[in-house]
Image (cartoon, rainbow, N blue to C red):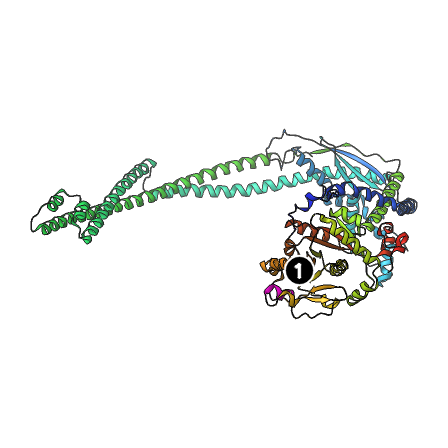
Amino acid sequence: MNQTRPIEPLPSRLSRSTEDGQQSPKAPQDIEEELDLFALLQTVWNGKWIITLLTLVSICLGFAYLKGMAVPLYTASATVVLDNREEQVVDLKNVMSGLSGDQATVNTEVEVIRSRGLAEQLVDELGLLNDPEFNGTLREPSRFSIGSLIGLLTGGSDEAEEQSAQRIRDDVVDRVLAALSVSNLRQSYVFTITMVTQSPEKSALMANTLAEVYIRDQLAVKFAATDAAVEWLSNRVSELRMELEQAEQAVKNFNASTDLISPEALEALNRQVKDLRTRIDEAQNLRGNAEGKLISLTTARDSGDMTLMAQIAEDPALNRIVATDLPNVDDLFMARFDQIERRVEQDRDRAAVQLAALQASYQSLNSRIEAQSDDLVQLQQLRREAEATGTIYAYFLNRLKETEVQRGIQQADSRVLSSSVVPVSASSPRTKMVLGIYAIFGLLAGTALVLGREAIQNTYRSAEELGDRTGARVLGTVPRIPVRKRAQLLRYIIDKPTSSAAEAIRNLRTSLMLSNIDAPPQVILSTSSIPSEGKTTLSILLAQNLAALGKKVLLIEGDMRRRVFSTYFDIPAEVGLVGVLTGEVPLEQAVSHEPTLGIDILPSENPNANAADLYSSDRFAEMLVEMRAKYDIIVLDTPPVLVVPDSRVAARHVDAVVFSVRWDSTHKHQVRAGLEMFASVGIKVTGVVLSQVDPKGLKRYGYGQYGGYGGNYGGYYQN
């Protein structure tokens, strides 16, 4: 009987006790907050000597930099204030008035002071092209410079290539900008211009000169802007005068070429159109009623039923004729019916003629309204254009007169608030700060080195870590079996019954059988997250161990795609699991007995259909029911869960799921993803197994005391 129980998703299982009394590990969130922090501190502590060494080396480098490479620098500052003047005569702010003083203007002025144009003026005024501090071509080349080393490596000539004058000038300006900094005092219009050079006098001179250059540049910009504005306004006024004359002439010409138009006349025409629409609707209704009546009469005539015809015609005379017993009642009835039908046709035709006349009047009236509306709109548009052109012309003419009057009275928007003074001491380098930075850098570099080395390790090295990180029960650990080929596995199992691997499988068997005391698992599924994690070897060892207890065991090759049982066993693979599932062969014919291990084996052949579809079939469930009746234990070796969905599909019909994780090989996120894929479909993974454990590796990583495969416990095993 299938003992599979529904299971809640993986995260919710991690914080409660299991059904057999074992307490589940803490949730992954708690592990990350508690254990990971402790492990992080422990890792840093274990690498304390590396961190200390790198910190000391970094401090020594800081001393070497201060004594041999650092150049003393001097800082000087000049302050400039922005005059926020609003009392200008003219309203053209970009030509004549002072700056507004808002934050955007303040930020703009900061960028103006730092601009390349002002820096070029400063270079020219102070002759900084002849200063070796800013012009690198004037310095004596160092024998051990990086440039000379690159020249030696690249095979360049000893003599440096001559640079163009423009390139030298650009480099000097770049160095001046690098030495310059401009700041704005918060909530004020005060700017601080700071220069940092190797000479105190030079720093003060450059700061003061740049402030003067900035103020002169403001005046030059205003004079140039005023001249440009006067020229532009003159040209624009001339153009607008011509446009105004043309617009006024267009209005006169249009008035002379069209009839007098008034909005009142158009409104009267619109009322007539509305009345015509109403009459047209009434005529359409009359015509429609007549047509409907005529259709009904025609239909009644075709039926030949005089009672129906009299009812449709709604004529009392027809009703009286129907009620009489005259011999020529049919002729009288039809004569009267024809008369009624002709009258209805006349009503329809009369309504159609009336409708056509109304529609013709409506179209004619609409044409008149449309023509007069277009003329009125065009006239109003011409008048508006003439008025707008006149307004713009008057505005620009007024501004032209004002701008011409204001020529030559511009003032700078800024003034020097305080000049810089020559500094008496160097501002950098700061010894304590430099050494502190180097010490912090060394500390961080050492910590990063230690943590980075540990972060590379993204696998599981102990059963405790595997259980804590995944939240799943660890059924056991299986050491790596020292065989080179898969075919040697059977001989190793027989020859080494007391090996560490055999004892590990016995412990695994015990944990698995006790995982559900009330209903020990009968069908066991073995899988992993990715290939080459030892799940097939584990399946064989587990089947052999259970058979050693006197159990009748069936080992099924559920990995239909790879089919590796042929590398372990000498069995025919002509028929097998696929043939049983498709009904081609009975189970007894497909099963082979392995006398060495004392188990029955059901191999697999190449499937003609998708393997997941075969596991989803009813035949697979029926086959397991049949196997449960014949065998004590059934071990199903399935493909990795992250590769194909076969394992998740087949797991619905089994009693236990054993999940293999290769020691120090499988990544943690792969294990987590594999377990979550089972949890996403409501399948409970009975437990995980840490497989292919290397005893020497355990000792190397410091887990030897937990492995049980060497050291104090080595005497219990014969490997």
Residue 289 lies in the magenta-colored region: no
Q: Which residue is label 1 attached to?
A: 630
The reply to whether the magenta stretch includes residue 576 is yes
Between residue 127 and residue 649, name the one nearer to us: 649
Farthest residue toward the front?
550
Q: Is residue 604 left or right of residue 69?
A: left
Above or below 408: residue 695: below
Q: Which residues are magenta?
A: 575-583
Q: Is residue 119 visible?
A: yes
Residue 89 falls in image quadrant: top right
State the residue in front, 148 or 544: 544
Circle 1: element type: helix
Which of the image's four quarters has the C terminus?
A: bottom right
- Residue at far top of view: 87
Amino acid, disc 1: Lys
Crowd tier of the residue under label 1, counting other residues whose Cα lies within 10 Å: few below 14, some 14–19, many 20 or above: few
Choose between 597 and 398: the one closer to the eye.
597
Toward the viewer: 530 or 19?
Answer: 19
Q: Residue at x 60, y 67 (%)?
A: 608
Expressed as whole percent of the image width and height from the top left, the position of residue 651 reads 65, 54
Secondary structure that dominates the magenta span? helix
x and y percentages locating residue 302 in the rendered image: 19, 54
In the rendered structure, the answer to whether residue 80 lies left or right of residue 60 reads left
Residue 455 appears at what percent x and percent y?
80, 50
In percent of width and height, residue 183 lies at 75, 36
Is residue 664 among what the camera can see?
A: no
Total marks placed: 1
